[in-house]
Every structure is written in structure tokens, then in C-alpha cells.
Amino acid sequence: MSPPPRRVLPPTEGPTGFFWTMGEDGQLRFLQCDACGYRIHPPTSYCPECGGREAVPRPVSGCATLYSFTVNHQPWDGDDRPYVIGVVELVEQAGLRLMTNIVGASPDEVYIGMPLEVTFDDLDPVHLPFFRPRST
């Protein structure tokens, strides 16, 4: 079995730091506006829904559906296995989407509308959120 590909890890400091370190406890979090409850992604300093400036990271269920995807066949770092890059939409809010990798299914098993759940790749201190087929 070949080693996993090397990843360039995101910074753990600054306004997006919480997003990359949150998975240590297994929970996916997004900023949520205190004024209107809108979930904000990507993280920014204001709410695009109401203009509010107060938002804190709050957990979501981690359940999503596959909105769109592509299969990457380009080998990186010597790993020639194809992998799925997907856009998932979280069940908590229409339009709350995240680009990620789809794991736990071969590329020919993946389909639009597929029910998914979050899992994390632990690269301490970074925990990358990936999605796999939902077990229910």
C-alpha cells in the first residue's frame, strides 16, 4: 500500500483557524451569525445575510448531500489513484456548501444527491473535513 499523498496544510491562526482545528472532537463547525442565525462559509468578518458583525463557530450535524463532484485522475506526489473532489451541501441550511474530498466510496459509486456524513483526517493540529457515504 502506497503512503497517502503529502498535503499542504492550511494555517491554524487567524479568522479561519477554527475551521481547520475543529475536528479534533469530531464536530464540524461553521460561523453562525448571532443576529439572524445564518451560517457563514467561507468564514468572513460579517454576515452576508443581515450584515451582522458578531458570529461564533457552532456545530452542525455533519450530514450533507453531494451537490456536485469531479473525479481527479492527475497523479500527485507519485499517487496515481483517482479521487473525488466534491461540493457538499449541509442539511442545516440551503446553500451552505463546502468543497472537500469524498472518501469511502470508489469514484464510480459516487452520485449527485448522495447522502454523506463528515469524517476527519487527523493531521494534528489540522483536522481536514472529508465526507463519506452516510451509514443510515
Image (cartoon, rainbow, N blue to C red):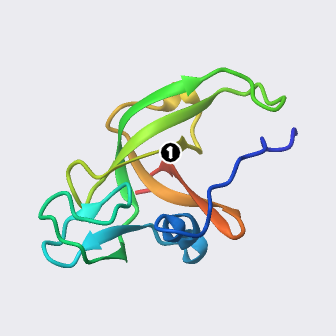
The total of numbered circles placed on residues is 1
Picture coordinates of residue 33, whole percent (x, y): 23, 72
Place of residue 111 in the rendered image (x, y in percent of width and height, measured from the top left): 40, 30
User: Residue, x 75% and y 29% (percent of image)?
Assistant: 76
Q: Secondary structure under badge 1? A: strand
Residue at 68% over, 54% down: 9
State which quarter of the image contains the C terminus: bottom left
Q: Is residue 24 left or right of residue 39?
A: right
Q: Is residue 57 left or right of residue 53?
A: right
For residue 41, above or below residue 7: below
Quadrant where the image shows the N terminus: top right
* 108 in relation to 50, above or below: above
Q: Residue furthest top?
A: 73
Q: Residue 89, position in %: x, y?
A: 32, 48
Nearest the viewer among 94 and 36 is 36
Residue occupied by mark 1: 100
Q: Quadrant of residue 45?
A: bottom left
Closer to the camera in the image, 43 or 27: 43
**Amino acid type at mark 1:** Thr
Q: Position of residue 91 (x, y in %)?
A: 27, 56
| Neighbours of disc 1 within 10 Å: few (<14), some (14-19), many (20+) | some
Q: Residue at x 23, y 48 (%)?
A: 95
In the rendered image, the vertical position of residue 46 relative to residue 77, given as above or below: below
On the image, which quarter does residue 119 sit in? bottom right
Q: Which residue is at a point 53% across and 72% down the rendered structure image?
A: 22
